[in-house]
Amino acid sequence: MATFSDPAADAGDASEAFRGLAHASRQFAHPSDMYKVIGDLLASARSLQQVLDQLAETHVALRTRAADDHGDPVTGTRDAFTAADHLREAAKLVSQVEDRLDSASQAAGRIAWHRSPVAPIAAHRWVSIVFMDGEDADEVLDMIDRDGVRAGIRHLEQWDFGDETTGAAMENGHVYDETPRTELDREVDDGEYRLTYSAAAGHVALYRRHTIPVPDEVDIELLERAPAAPGLSGLARNAGGLTPATLSLGTQSTTAPWFEHPGIAQLKRERGLGL
């Protein structure tokens, strides 16, 4: 039972409670209990931060009563300040723990736990095949205007080399939940392909729907290694002056958001479409 007046006794009770929790949390009979545990740990982290700050303040406030084992007040005062500094640093670290627990609590709160394993669902993504702007895009846009959208798709399919294209797109981050587009773009689906184009912006792009096999949908080791904020680097998507036979892999960096097509980002800058 908390005394709310005896810090030494309450610290001992807290230590014993955490020792019991460390033992009990080795397994959960009811997975939904984890959300409550995280919430209680979040509250504990907030209280712990307060305790550490208060301990630091008290060390400084009572420094005139501090001395070492030989009665030296200078050494005692120095150690009081040192302890206070370390306690403040510990409080800052606990604040970071609190932030992480808060994020974990939000994620855990969105989980609906089932009594038995849930069958995974295959995911669908859009693989970038080719992006064109300038004169190359004008040729395709004229073809679309003259012969129809599907004629443009058939033409751009020449840049699709199957597994090679898919592998390169995945390696370089050109795989999307939804195809990138600007407000000026039109989208047309044709089987597994999606064409996005804009005569006003002067660009055209082709994507192919790719089904991610179920075993690859959730890779725990990959998630653990994934950076917090992925960058964008990979294929040089502008196919200006290239034919399917000569299209090669390159590297491109950009200040655009990681989810934005690099070609679209450049067009926004050149044509004043961005902010």
Image (tube, rainbow, N blue to C red):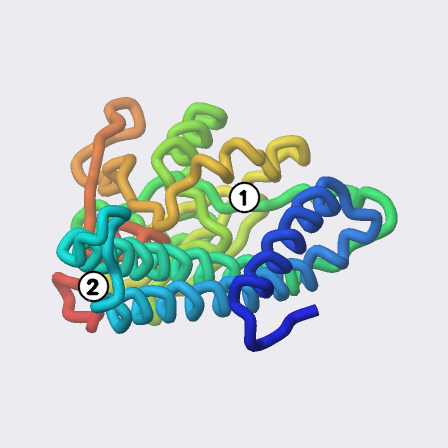
Q: Amino acid at mark 2?
A: Lys
Residues 149 and 247: in front is 247
The residue that appears at 82% across and 53% down in the rendered structure is 30
Residue 49: % across, % down: 42, 65
Residue labelled with disc 1 = 209
- Asked if disc 2 and disc 1 are in contact, CB closer than 8 Å, the reply is no
Q: Residue at x 33, y 70 (%)?
A: 58
Residue at the spot of label 2: 268
Residue 114 appears anywhere in the view: yes
Distance between mark 2 and mark 1 Cα atoms: 25 Å
Q: Earlier in the sequence, mark 2 or mark 1?
A: 1
Where residue 245 appears, x then y in whole percent?
A: 29, 23
In this rendering, would 10 be left or right of 165?
right
* Few, some or many residues within 10 Å of mark 2 (<14, 14–19, 20+): some
Tell me the residue at 61%/38% (across/down).
217
Residue 136, quarter of the rendered image: top left
Q: Which mark is residue 40?
A: none
Q: The residue under label 1 is which amino acid type? A: Arg
Quadrant location of residue 144? bottom left
Residue 183 at x, y percent in the picture: 35, 71
Q: Which residue is depicted at the point 27% across and 60% down?
A: 84
* Residue situated in front as seen by the camera: 110 or 26: 26
